[in-house]
């Protein structure tokens, strides 16, 4: 048994989280009083084996590198002290390109840390289906853009559609044979067009090609490499600043994931030099959180242009393209990483 079964405390905690996201001013004191992150997003590397023309990595000014194993294990040791924590391995790179990727996954597994990973499929070249299933990876998302007509190779330069499909088929078959509930296996596609009928056609075609080979299909909006226009109407309170700590490969912690698309990126410390809790409770972070609770974003004006604060953006693709069969199922999936498989 890898994880403690989900009990009443988990249900209460997650119910409170959902209420806090949708009605933040009712639970603002609780949000501001949380002294540690719930999700730690770790960029193991910003190196990648593909060159997607729409990826923000194509205009990245940071140098390319790998997180040191010592910094990673330090993050995990600290995270093990946080209740309900989730490790999300993601960033401007392909995580499985890290030279010690398997060791990193095994270390987090040994410390009983649930992991969510987003990959372009290279993970299947590094870990076998059995290794993935027996690890603490509870959510695995594979990003796929384009189709078997050759458009995949154009959008995912360096990738091979046939190899990817064979690897995904083998992994899905292994999950079925072992009857494993973990990881929740998602195939993800970016809707590049803003035209409604083109988006719908792309989503329908993607589901037709990949349904039956995963647990879930999801769709992301294309995020421009520069955000300049303010969002219209009432803004949504961003849960990112209240729950997520981003860590780049060199240990630096950006204030949020989208700021660099709008203004110069702010950093609040380095996990190689400071404890995670100290970074999380940084004065600037608290200032931005308070700005969201009060509704006065003058201290965080960049948030007015961010896709995370658009009122309906978070759930639009779920509603329009049927990524989830029901709201109840969506809620249950977000709890899955705490349920014993």
Image (cartoon, grey):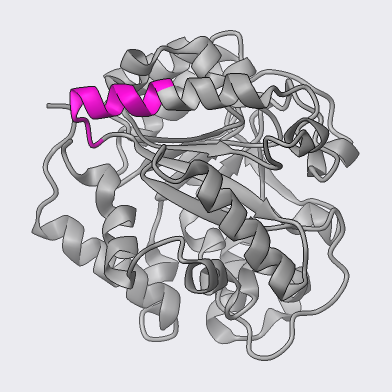
In this view, 163 is above or below 208: above
Q: Which picture quadrant has residue 15?
A: bottom left
Which secondary structure dominates the residues rendered in magenta?
helix
**Is residue 10 rendered to the left or right of residue 129?**
left
Placement of 37 over or under 116, stated as above or below = below
Q: Residue at x 82, y 34 (%)?
A: 154
Foreground pick, 112 / 314: 314
Determine the residue positioned at 40% across, 50% down.
38
**Going by the image, does 23 lie left or right of 333?**
right
Res 325 quadrant in image = bottom left
Where 296 falls versus 159 (above or below)? below
As for residue 91 lying within the magenta part, the answer is no
Magenta highlight range: 170-181
Residue 303 visible (yes or no):
no
Residue 36 spot, x, y in % from top left: 41, 50
Camera-side residue: 199 or 95? 199
Residue 191 lies, in percent from the top left, at 69, 58
What residue do we see at 63% from left, 89% from top? 234
Q: Left or right? Give the position of 111 relative to 247.
A: left
Query: Which residue appears farthest toward the bottom when viewing the image?
Result: 233
Res 294 → quadrant: bottom right
Where is residue 291? Give x, y as percent.
62, 77
Q: Is residue 338 visible?
A: yes
**Could you tell me which quadrant the N terminus lies in?**
top left
* 148 relative position to 225: left or right: left
**Residue 138, x across and y down, in percent:** 33, 36
């Amino acid at each position: 048994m890898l994880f403690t079964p989900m009990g009443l405390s988990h249900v209460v905690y997650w119910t409170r989280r959902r209420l806090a996201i949708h009605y933040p001013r009712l639970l603002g004191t609780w949000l501001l009083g949380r002294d540690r992150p719930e999700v730690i997003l770790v960029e193991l590397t910003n190196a990648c084996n593909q060159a997607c023309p729409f990826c923000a990595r194509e205009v990245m000014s940071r140098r390319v590198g790998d997180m040191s194993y010592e910094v990673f294990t330090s993050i995990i040791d600290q995270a093990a002290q946080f209740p309900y924590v989730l490790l999300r391995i993601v960033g401007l790179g392909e995580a499985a390109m890290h030279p010690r990727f398997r060791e990193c996954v095994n270390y987090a597994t040994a410390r009983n840390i649930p992991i969510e990973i987003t990959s372009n499929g290279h993970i299947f070249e590094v870990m076998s289906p059995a290794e993935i299933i027996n690890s603490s990876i509870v959510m695995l998302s594979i990003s796929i853009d384009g189709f078997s007509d050759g458009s995949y190779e154009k959008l995912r330069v360096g990738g091979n559609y046939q190899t990817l499909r064979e690897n995904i088929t083998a992994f899905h078959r292994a999950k079925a044979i072992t009857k494993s509930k973990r990881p929740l296996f998602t195939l993800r596609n970016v809707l590049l067009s803003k035209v409604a009928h083109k988006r719908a056609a792309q989503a329908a075609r993607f589901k037709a090609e990949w349904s039956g080979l995963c647990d879930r299909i999801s769709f992301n909006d294309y995020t421009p490499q520069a955000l300049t226009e303010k969002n219209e109407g009432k803004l949504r309170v961003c849960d990112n600043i209240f729950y997520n700590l981003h860590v780049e490969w060199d240990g630096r912690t950006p204030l949020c994931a989208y700021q660099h698309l709008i203004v110069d990126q702010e950093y609040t410390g380095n996990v190689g030099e400071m404890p995670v809790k100290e970074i999380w409770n940084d004065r600037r972070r608290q200032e931005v959180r308070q700005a969201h609770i009060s509704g006065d974003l003058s201290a965080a004006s960049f948030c007015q242009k961010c896709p995370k604060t658009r009122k309906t953006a978070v759930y639009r693709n779920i509603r329009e393209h049927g990524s989830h069969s029901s709201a109840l199922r969506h809620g249950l999936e977000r709890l899955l990483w705490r349920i014993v498989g």
